[in-house]
Image: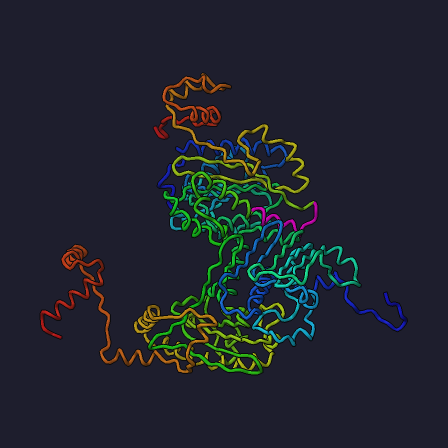
Amino acid sequence: MPNTDIKINYYLRPQKSIERKMFCHLFRELNSIFNLKGYRYIGMGAKYFVDFMVFHREFGFNKMISIEADKENKEKYEFNKPLNCIEMEYSYSSEALSQIDWVGYKNNIIWMDYDEPLKEFMLEEIRTIISKSKSGSMFFFSYNNLLPKHVKDRLKAFKDNLGGYCPPNVNNQDLTDKNKDKYIKQIIDNVIDNCINIINNSSNENDKLFYEQLVYFLYRDGAEMITIGGILLNKQDKEKFDMLNLSSSLDFVVLNRTAPPYSLVIPPLTYKEINALLQQLPCTDITKIKLPGLQEEQLRQIAKLYRYYPFYMEAASFN
Amino acid sequence: MDRRGNIVQSGPTKDFFISMITRDISLTDAIIELIDNCIDGVKRQGKEDFDNYTIDIELNSNFFSIKDNCGGIDINIAREYAFKFGRPKEANKDENRAETTGTFGIGMKRALFKMGSHFFIESTALNSWFKLEIDVPVWASDDDNWDFEFTDYKEGIENKEPDCGTYIKVTNLYPSISNSFSYNPYINEVINKVKGRASYVINNGMTIKINNVKVESNFLKLVNDGFIKPYKYTFTNDNVAVIIVAGLAPDTDPAQAGWYIYCNNREIVAADKTSLTTWKDRDDDESIKYHNDYAAFRGFVFFNSKFPELLPWNTSKNGIDSSAYIYQTTKQHMIDAFKTVTGEIKKLYSKDDELRSEILSTLKKSNNIELNYYTAYSLPENTVVKFVDDYTTDIQKDPEVRIIYSKPKSEVEAIKQKLNVKSNKEVGILTFEYYVEMEGLE
């Protein structure tokens, strides 16, 4: 995890940027029933803190924690920390999650933005988060979706990564490119459901928690990544939530837990292409869009995502 | 109901009874209990090898099922013993005794009541067949009638041996049970536990499948080589045969260190490092407190008897009744075995680092046996475990020393090419030998 910031320039990841904008739209909707200003944001800001800046600006979170495993370079993070309300927690995420104050801050938006493939410790962290969360809290986590290139090498890597959480009857077929997303998602949902059931088993009717999935993104800025997550709701909040009818207002919201991921994959575009496309969008019949060199599937993604697409321009930050 | 004036009612209500018998057995142990019943089925037929016998278990959020071809329950046994709470005295006089784990007459019932509120049992034996279906709330609503009724049955028929077996299905699982049965880490826990408890039958040919995954056997290893033999002591006391084996493992995994106790081949205690066995729990005790220096210690005790009620296990079969006379007798021999083996380990750790790591790496490379009842049985008796002194004398005839030096990488690489070797170590040894040979020093 340390030093990912050297590999990737976080400012230049268009799909990640689309994802952040979608999160903003989502939070804006939810803001109408939950007062997000009082929420605490927990994330993994690296040295860029892009999500921290965006969410603070939009929602005014006053308490933000950035988990950073790269303890050796504290100065770098302290130097880059863009806001006074960001608190650094220098430890591995599992440690950090068990050390933070869960008593004083009941409402959280947590985004565990890992860059590794799904591992046992991440699933354990989901358990920690769920068991400490109150109705209205949201958690999301992103992981690298790539398995070893050759299918025959996947089984061992997969079992090693997941340890006790790996379904005992896993086989090569479950891990083919065609099946893996669904299979991995079931493992995650298995953990979420088990944890919620345990809480509910010992709670009275009004305190019982429901988990509503909100997002299930797939994107590919470099490595293929998945972001998955949702909101925890008690009975009363769930009624309010259902009234929002999120999926009708935001088409990227995936409430159905058996649905495939919502793809944020979009081809890089030139300024000329962007302008030409915008003149033809929105449009109901994609086949009518005229632009050389783009396939129908790519056009379909562009038509779906153009409102969130970031337009990069070179600009000098000092003159 | 009897309402005579001098009668004070003391019989239990069924609800109380169910809640009591299911409370002190863990869910995993309940499953193990049902597997043990199947294994006992084979043992009662006097079979030694378990080829062609299969136990198929399925667990998920909706139901638990276990299907075997291990002989089935004869209808008369079903009528008189199998479903009775507690074992009737006359059952113990049975001449066809085997080294079974079934003994208290509570295991199967307790396991079923633990999981859910509806069971279905179908069993085919050589001369009978029956079906039994129990809806617990209905059965529990009448505190006076404790009997179950067959849904259907046939007797005086002839069935072929391979067709004999039992199928049990529990539905209407309780919420917490259903939640566990659908949880991957729990299913893995069951598989691991079955591995520990049933490896000896799996090794003897039995197939056990859990959610269609074949459980593989897995045994602990003990060093058994020319210079070091395991400690073994056996004795028989009041129809209980006891084998004690102790020694050193080739690996030093602290999680696996300690004592393992088996009753009729069922693992009751694993990796124990407490005063239940030979360690001490507190500092004011005389014996040895566990420390990672002892990570290679492995001790095994096998209690076997055709009278399972004589074995020192508790009713959940997950712990030892340390006050049992047979266990107290055995414990003395465990202490002797322990002192012998740990004495050598202490000696080993009194040596300097270099010698110790050399001995430990020799242990790692030496021959070993996978320890289970059968291999323990065939080991020769031996109460002498000595290897540290012998090893030291061996070496002292011409003790070896370690040479460590650094040289420029480019030169070492060049020599590697010349000598056609890959490691720095080989470069060191071969250049040393070259010098010895050239100077005629041998």
Main SS category, magenta section: helix
Q: Quadrant of residue B344?
A: bottom left
- The residue nearer to you, when weighing A77 against A166, is A166
Q: Residue furthest left?
A: B439
Q: What residue span does the magenta drawing correspond to?
A: A192-205
On the rendered structure, is A10 left or right of B119?
left
**x then y, percent, for residue A59:** 55, 34
- The residue nearer to you, when weighing A313 against A169, is A169
Q: Which residue does the image show at 42% across and 77% down from the upper left?
A: B379
- The residue nearer to you, when weighing B109 against B408, is B109
Q: Which residue does the image show at 50% across and 69% down from the upper left?
A: B48
Q: Quadrant of the C terminus of chain A?
A: top left
**x then y, percent, for residue A39:** 57, 40
On the rendered structure, is B154 left or right of A215?
right
| Tally of numbered tags | 0
Q: Which residue does the image show at 45% across and 36% down from the upper left?
A: A50
Q: Which residue does the image show at 36% across and 44% down from the upper left?
A: A150
Residue A115 visible to an observer of this rendering? yes
Q: Residue furthest right?
A: B5
> Height in image: B234 above or below A226?
below
| The magenta stretch spans residue B49 | no
